[in-house]
Amino acid sequence: MNLSLYLLTVLIWGTTWIALKLQLGEVAIPLSIAYRFSLAAAVLFAILLLSRRLQPLDRRGQLLCLAQGLCLFCLNFMCFYTASQWIPSGLVAVIFSTATLWNALNARVFMGRRIAANVLAGGALGLLGLGLLFWPELAHHEASRETLLGIGLAVLGTLCFSVGNLLSSLQQQAGLRPVTTNAWGMFYGALLLLAYCLVSGVPFTFEANTRYIGSLLYLAIPGSVIGFTAYLTLVGRMGPERAAYCTVLFPVVALNISVFVEGYQWTLPALLGLGLVMLGNVLVFRQPKPLAPVAASGRA
């Protein structure tokens, strides 16, 4: 079951970049994100109400959902979209892949979870592998004030994502299913984004064409309803540090799709990077060997 959820998350999030590119146009980015999570929340609430599976939340649960909505479905997207205006998308992907390491560190600090050496080693190998995959894009980008600002925003977005992972883990420890907390979190995230658009004077527009509506539906239902539910279920089952290795693998899926869509060509460094990413994946999911029991001495 865990493997199915893992592969599903990687495949879905590895293809959402196509829909994201199709979203670019007349509608402002914050408004498009708000549309996405408004629709996703509506779908989740409809499913939960019709199946009578919507769990009741107390005040603490609602506050955690609000925080989760701010971190997972609002701030991190704003940070990544804005950062992409100043730094290459490959650099954004590399920074986002550090979520595996951030999740391990944050789980240690805030939840007292032991940091497994194989998770840290696997995350580091995956990060190095992504660096090789995107090296041509990174090497030709000049450093500037905008670059530093873009890197800072990408790091902030990754930290928000990591905090959202831990909040979901806390909710699941309290017996709340990700499908319920995601519904409320996406609802709150959409409200916050709509409030931002209203305050900042973003024009409320909509593109009523097949390209925009089709990409919106893909991002809202497979990308959000299915993708985030599968991923956060993994966070609860496997721990935030292991689940976050998805962030290393989905750029690899995106590059493979780019071979057919955009004519991307594999190079020797890129293939070496792919090998490191795969090796990192093996390390992250390798179960540590149990310690051998100590034999009794037989003395009284």
Image (cartoon, grey):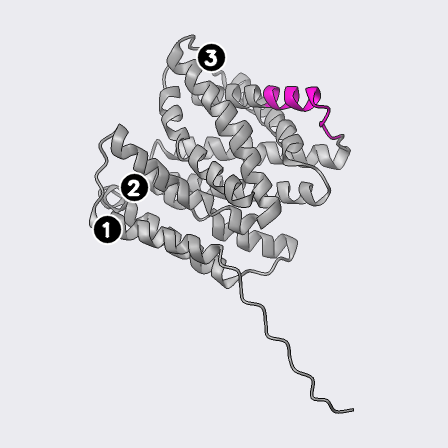
Q: Quadrant of residue 266?
A: top left
What number is the disc on residue 225? none
Percent coordinates x, y for residue 133 in the rendering: 29, 46
Percent coordinates x, y for residue 234 in the rendering: 57, 43
Q: In the image, is residue 69 above or below residue 22?
A: below
- For mark 1, what is the residue? 269
Pointer 1: residues within 10 angstroms few (<14), some, or many (20+)? some
Residue 74 in sight from this viewpoint: no
- For mark 2, what is the residue? 144
Q: Is residue 1 shown in magenta?
A: no
Compare marks 1 and 2 and give the one earlier in the sequence.
2
Q: Is residue 113 left or right of residue 274?
A: right
Amino acid type assigned to the residue bearing label 2 in the image: Ser
Judging from the image, what secondary structure is the residue with disc 3 in?
Answer: loop
Pointer 2: residues within 10 angstroms few (<14), some, or many (20+)? few
Q: Are marks 3 and 2 in contact (CB under 8 Å)?
A: no
Judging from the image, what secondary structure is the residue with disc 1 in?
Answer: helix
